Amino acid sequence: MKRPVLVVCLAVFGLMAGQQMLNPILPPLAREFGFSEFALA
């Protein structure tokens, strides 16, 4: 019963960590391609 809970917790942690790594990169990348910062949101 504990294994599925562990898998879900690790998946959520991985998704949050990935999002936190992409947040500082996306606005300059969007400006480089000519999009506004809100176009990628």
Image (tube, rainbow, N blue to C red):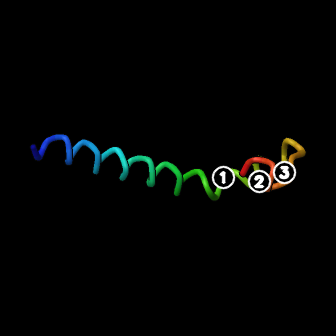
Q: Residue at x 80, y 55 (%)?
A: 37
Q: Are marks 1 and 2 in contact (CB under 8 Å)?
A: yes
Q: Would you name the residue on which mark 2 appears?
A: 28
- Disc 1 from disc 3: Cα separation: 11 Å
User: Which amino acid lies under the numbered mark 1 shown in the image of this protein?
Assistant: Ile
Q: Are marks 3 and 2 in contact (CB under 8 Å)?
A: yes
Q: Residue lying farthest right?
A: 34
On screen, residue 41 versus residue 6, left or right, reads right
Mark 2 crowdedness (10 Å alpha carbons): few <14, some 14-19, many ≥20 = few
- Disc 3 from disc 2: Cα separation: 5 Å
Residue 25, disc: 1
User: Which amino acid lies under the numbered mark 3 shown in the image of this protein?
Assistant: Arg
User: Which amino acid lies under the numbered mark 2 shown in the image of this protein?
Assistant: Pro
Q: Residue at x 44, y 47 (%)?
A: 15
Mark 3 crowdedness (10 Å alpha carbons): few <14, some 14-19, many ≥20 = few
Pinpoint residue 20: horizontal percent, then vertical percent.
52, 57
Pinpoint residue 36: horizontal percent, then vertical percent.
86, 53
- Disc 1 from disc 2: Cα separation: 6 Å
Pinpoint residue 12: horizontal percent, then vertical percent.
37, 50
Q: Residue at x 85, y 41 (%)?
A: 33
Q: Is residue 8 above or below residue 16?
A: above
Which element type, helix, strand or loop, lies under badge 2? Answer: helix
Q: Would you name the residue on which mark 3 appears?
A: 31
On screen, residue 35 versus residue 14, left or right, reads right
